[in-house]
Image: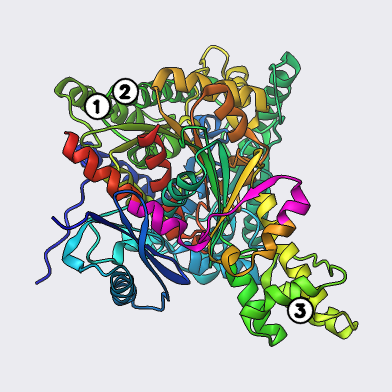
Amino acid sequence: MLAKKESPRKEIAATKTLKKIMANHFYDLDEAARTGSKKIAWCTSVGPAELLRGMGFLVYFPENHGAMLGATRMATELIPHANAIGYSPDICSYLTSDIGSYLAKKTPLTKAYNIKSVPRPDVLVFNTNQCRDVQDWFSWYGREFGVPVIGVHTHRDIGQIRDYQIKDIAKQIEDLVPPLEEVSGQKFDMDRFREAVELSRQCSVLWRTCLETAAAIPSPWTFFDHTIHMGPAVVARGTKEAVDYYELLLEELNQRIESGIAAVEGEKYRLYWEGMPIWGKLRPLSELFISLKTCIVASTYCNSWIFDQLDPEEPFESMARAYTELFIVRDEAYKEQYIKNCHEFFKFHGIIFHDAKTCPNNSNNRYGMPERLSKKMGIPTLTINGDLNDLRCYSEEQAKTNVEAFIEQLEEN
Amino acid sequence: MAEEVFAGVDVGASRTKVALLNKDKEVLGCAVRKSGTDFARTSELALGEALEMAGVRKEDITFSVATGYGRKNVIYADDTRTEIGCHAKGAFHFFPMAITVIDIGGQDNKIIKLDERGRRLSFKMNRKCAAGTGAFLEEMAMRLDIPLEEMEGLARQAVETVELGSFCTVFSATEVLEKIRQGKKVPDIVKGLFLSVIKRVLEMDSLTERVVMTGGVVEYNPYLVVMMRERTGLEIMVPERPQLTGAIGAALYGMEEVAEAAAA
């Protein structure tokens, strides 16, 4: 019998609870879809989830399904199905793998939870703060299922945030209420909405605190852990389960710090990850960095679900603020300052930019930022070419050599 | 006591190079072989050749460092380093000053910037595509039905340069066939292909005042260096055996490791 190769990664005990939360999330959706017991809204990952929960919808996030398609390495095989019906291989590979998954009638939910298909939506709600692709993506399903597609159109390239921008987004979110009432058949209840906003705020504050534990030297967890444990912040924000989960996780992380437990044994170097994860390569990349005694301590991506501006006293305005202050919609100057602030807080030695072929909005290396930041911050940067889901765009050997050479460079200087 | 010998083995995607250095950093022996598919065997054979040339026995090697795409397949290596590190180390050995190293290899290109102490400031590798690498020239030689080794001579005979527009190797091949149909001369097309390599390299990064070119493509096609000089107006330096730069760098790393261990 072949001996099972032991992974050098240190499992987080809370993962057991995390798995239960994720499983229940999908079981609830599946049941509602099969029985019609509750209305289902599909929502973009940084869409108005609080409003949907406050209006009694069960919320499903196709981007989360996209990430699962990537992590299970099903995406590369499914993307061509969407390409064949006119969706270019150059656009978002979450979109193409998700639509491909629907066309091929294959979903990772089957193997993970014995669920046959994604839950049929009653309404699709987007926020273009991630990109225009989310609207195109939801529009495809809107036509397929014959259900309404509504959403929020974000402002972009924002420097200083102006009142008119907040008012506009708040009004756009408020304008979603009548069509959602029509779909749900229920009157909007302000108290329920406020409750969802408050729970989402608590979840955000705890998620931020969890991420900030990585400032400890050595760090108790890594970016690769963050990408897994962010699940509840994405799919369950606005619920009590998510809040309870991050309290549990935080306790474990603090315990690790107290006991001096390092996620990367003998941590020598600390890095920042800018851009999307390469979902299908999380494990080999995580093990590569461990072998190089390098911990990726923070990332823009996992910080993107921090919405502590949320305020139940001003639910629409505070949601507008939370979704407008987001990194992805800001101008270059803001983004650079943001990463500089992270550098001061997390004390990393270098930055890895992931140039994701199909995700321009999350590939911040394309307008000279690595060069500018390297000069301003006096630390080296490395750009890796790849993609979030389409592994045809990723050369493992080249990426590995680049990472190894980058660590050699840190060692020698 | 036998002289200390340090081996550097650079297993590239196209060629495997071995350099044996004594402690005065002189090359005692070297070898270049096609890498093929069995990297372990090729690196053994290449080492054997280099040992024979140096008149040294394998057991007399003090330390071996492997580098390149197949570095993990070199069974006898004591350590491995990336080709980026080794090309930097090798280039700085020959030109100890602040330099930009351009390595044009069989399947990838690198641009590495070093400060006056030889410390790496930054590096870039070509993206997934092999345009502008040795593989591009090999493919084009095949399409033009000319031996690879004749390209250098043909480029030097060019009267004008036939510029090619495409990034893509496959589309470039179509473009080359189109130029032939238009009656363009082969030497002019070959010079255009060389220019294409240079353009791909210059797109990767900015250059500093002093540039060192390394790698097999430059060793067999030194006219590329002439063209790079003309194109950039910069001083371009080339080691005597540019193809061995990575292997020499690897051997130098080995020498440092032994010295560090002795000092510890």
Q: Is residue A238 magenta?
A: no
- Label 2, on which residue? A213
In the picture, measured across the screen, residue A324 lies left or right of residue B250, that is right
- Label 3, on which residue? B174
Q: Is residue A353 visible?
A: no
Nearer the camera: disc 3 or disc 1: 3
Residue B44 sits in quarter:
bottom left
Residue under the point 61% across and 20% down: A321
Earlier along the polypeptide chain: callout 2 or callout 1?
A: 2
Q: What range is drawn magenta here? A: B228-251
Local SS, label 3: helix
Residue under the point 51% across and 32% down: B116
- Callouts 2 and 1 on one subunit: yes
Residue closest to the eye, A169 or B264: B264
Callout 3: 10 Å neighbours few (<14), some, many (20+)?
some
Please report, as a chain letter, where disc 3 is located. B
- Callouts 3 and 2 on one subunit: no
Q: Amino acid at mark 3?
A: Thr
Please report, as a chain letter, where disc 1 is located. A
Please report, as a chain letter, where disc 2 is located. A
Residue A2 sits in quarter:
bottom left
Q: Is residue B233 magenta?
A: yes
Task: Give the x, y percent position of residue A53.
Answer: 49, 33
Task: Give the x, y percent position of residue B233.
Answer: 76, 46
In the picture, measured across the screen, residue B163 lies left or right of residue B99, that is right
**In which quadrant of the rendered image does the N terminus of chain B lie?**
bottom left
Mark carried by residue A253: 1
Task: Kindly report the secondary structure that dominates the magenta region of the rendered protein.
Answer: helix
Q: Is residue B226 visible?
A: yes
